[in-house]
Image (cartoon, helix red, strand yellow):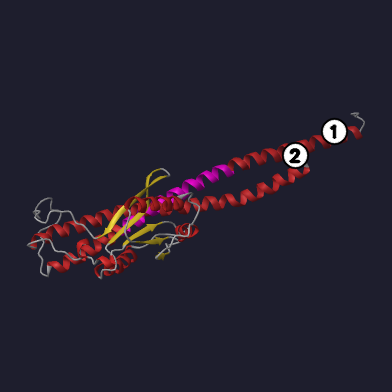
């Protein structure tokens, strides 16, 4: 019983040391989760502004301008499809990365790409691919704490857009998890390149106007190219944020469960320790009573 008592005391001390760490990690995940949601809301407003700019400038063209080549214009020798998967940089998020790998392999199998490259963002996801001995053509770390900035996303997509226009690949697909509710997330796919803008180029700029009349004193094609670049960057940045929301939601709920389990274990250990103390006190009182002749064995 003494050994059990000492073991319970040791376990209680260890868990009491770990519990504040779980709480701190949970708070950090909640903070990043909320920050990503706020950025998504702000990004939606930004995309609305970009959309409004296109409404104003598209009527200036006889036909919709094309900045990047279409799939049909790509030489057959360079028909790679880039498949970028956004994972996590840190662990403690359950099957977040393992599920991404499984869904990616299913996605590739279903689409039967003639030629493709796997690109990965997130060290934990990279390890999952390497464990399965799957070749990764490009990799990039995610922030260990916090989020990418929009400027960083813009610079990354500019490099990809330059490669796309140099015929390095013909299609760019992004795969990631997005939050559904609570800790439940789903796998999603998004075609980043070639960029498709579905708005009718003949739309009347006076419809649903949010701005005063706009005067364009420069080449509208230059404005169009800049807007498309930012549309692509904003689309990619939103996917990064959606992935971060799903990741930190999963981590938060896992840490919440771990904290609750730790509290339950602490209560059980305290009960064991108190019961052993009571037993020892009772035993000592009995021994005193026997030594005083008040009790006989």
Residue 277, numbered circle? 2
- The quarter of the rendered structure image containing the C terminus is top right
Q: Position of residue 220 (x, y in %)?
A: 12, 66
Residue sitting at 67 percent across and 47 percent down? 11
**Alpha carbon of mark 2 to alpha carbon of mark 1: how far?**
14 Å
Magenta stretch contains residue 241: yes
Position of 140 relative to 7 (above/below): below
Kindly identify which residue carries mark 1: 286
Q: Position of residue 74 (x, y in %)?
A: 23, 65
Helix, strand or loop for disc 2: helix
Position of 248 relative to 5 (above/below): below
Bin the neighbour count of mark 2 within 10 Å (Cα to Cα): few under 14, some 14-19, many 20 and up: few
Q: Nearer the viewer, residue 72 or 138?
A: 72
Locate residue 90 relative to residue 266 in the image: left or right.
left
Locate residue 257 relative to residue 171 in the image: left or right.
right
Q: Quadrant of residue 85?
A: bottom left
Q: Nearer the viewer, residue 12 or 157?
A: 157
Q: Which residues are magenta?
A: 236-262
Locate residue 90 relative to residue 224 in the image: left or right.
right
Locate residue 71 relative to residue 58 in the image: left or right.
right
Residue sitting at 12 percent across and 70 percent down? 219
Q: Nearer the viewer, residue 200 or 78?
A: 78
Magenta stretch contains residue 244: yes
N-term mark: 2 or 1: 2
Residue sitting at 11 percent across and 56 percent down? 201
Q: In terms of secondary structure, what is the magenta stretch mainly?
A: helix
């Amino acid at each position: 019983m003494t050994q059990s008592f000492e073991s319970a005391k040791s376990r209680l001390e260890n868990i009491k040391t770990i519990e504040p760490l779980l709480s701190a990690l949970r708070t950090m995940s909640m903070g990043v989760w909320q920050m990503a949601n706020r950025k998504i809301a702000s990004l939606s407003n930004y995309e609305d502004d970009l959309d409004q700019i296109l409404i104003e400038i598209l009527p200036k063209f006889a036909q919709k301008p094309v900045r990047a080549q279409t799939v049909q214009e790509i030489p057959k020798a360079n028909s790679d499809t880039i498949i970028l998967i956004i994972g996590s940089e840190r662990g403690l998020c359950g099957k977040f990365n393992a599920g991404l790998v499984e869904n990616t392999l299913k996605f590739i199998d279903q689409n039967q790409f003639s030629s493709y490259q796997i690109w990965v963002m997130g060290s934990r996801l990279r390890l999952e691919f390497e464990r399965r001995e799957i070749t990764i053509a490009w990799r990039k770390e995610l922030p260990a704490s916090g989020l990418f900035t929009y400027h960083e996303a813009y610079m990354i997509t500019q490099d990809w857009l330059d490669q796309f226009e140099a015929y390095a690949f013909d299609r760019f697909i992004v795969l990631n998890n997005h939050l559904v509710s609570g800790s439940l997330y789903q796998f999603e796919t998004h075609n980043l390149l070639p960029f498709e803008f579905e708005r009718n180029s003949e739309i009347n700029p006076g419809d649903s106007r949010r701005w005063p009349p706009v005067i364009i004193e420069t080449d509208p094609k230059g404005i169009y190219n800049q807007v498309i670049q930012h549309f692509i960057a904003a689309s990619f940045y939103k996917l990064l944020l959606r992935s971060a929301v799903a990741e930190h939601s999963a981590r938060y709920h896992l840490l919440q469960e771990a904290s609750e389990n730790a509290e339950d274990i602490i209560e059980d250990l305290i009960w064991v320790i108190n019961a052993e103390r009571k037993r020892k006190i009772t035993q000592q009182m009995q021994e005193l009573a026997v030594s005083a002749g008040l009790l006989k064995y």
